[in-house]
Image (cartoon, rainbow, N blue to C red):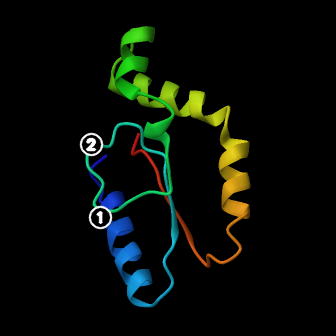
Amino acid sequence: AGTGKTSMMQRLNAYLHEQGKPPYIVNLDPAVTYMPYGANIDIRDTVDYKNVMKQYKLGPNGGILTACNLFATRFDQVVGLCESKRDVEYILVDTPGQ
């Protein structure tokens, strides 16, 4: 956490837009509170990290890991959506830092 992954994604996204090659963006970080760009697929639309923490009585890292595991049950859908984007040259994936 805090290594600049989201900042790097923001810069890559801005650069690719400047080049006329907007990327398809996937956010896999369920605990991110602010994203300076829009994601085409966002884990937070499927899994509520804070509810996972409460439901399973977990701390932050356990909540993130469990939220990712729950989302993984639908990852074939994510892959399918990414594969269907034939007009997109780049797919960027932002991940949790844990």
Q: Which mark is residue 7?
A: 1
Amino acid found under the numbered disc labelled 1: Ser
- The crowding category of the residue bearing disc 1, from other C-alpha atoms within 10 Å (few below 14, some 14 to 19, many at least 20), is some
Disc 1 on helix, strand or loop?
A: helix
Q: How far apart are marks 2 and 1 (CA)?
A: 13 Å
Pointer 2: what residue? Answer: 33
Residue at coordinates 41% horizontally, 27% vertically from top-left? 48
What residue is rendered at 39% in x and 45% in y? 97
Residue 58 image offset from top left, x and y in percent: 39, 15
Residue 21 at what x, y percent from top left?
A: 51, 84
Q: Position of residue 52 (x, y in %)?
A: 43, 19
Amino acid at circle 2? Thr
Query: Which image quadrant: the C terminus?
Result: top left
When asked about the image quadrant of residue 44, the answer is top left
Q: Judging from the image, what secondary structure is the residue with disc 2 in?
A: loop
Say which residue appears at 34% left-offset and 23% top-offset: 50
Give x and y (percent) for residue 33: 27, 42
Give 53 or 2, whichever is nearer the viewer: 53
Please tell me whether residue 95 is drawn above or below residue 16 in the rendered image: above
Q: How many neighbours does mark 2 have within 10 angstroms: few (below 14), some (14-19), or many (20 or more)?
A: few
Q: Which of marks 2 and 1 is nearer the N terminus?
A: 1
Is 25 on the left-hand or right-hand side of 80? Answer: left
Number of the front mark, 2 or 1:
2
Query: At 67% from the left edge and 68% from the top edge, which residue is drawn?
Result: 85
Occupied quadrant, residue 10: bottom left
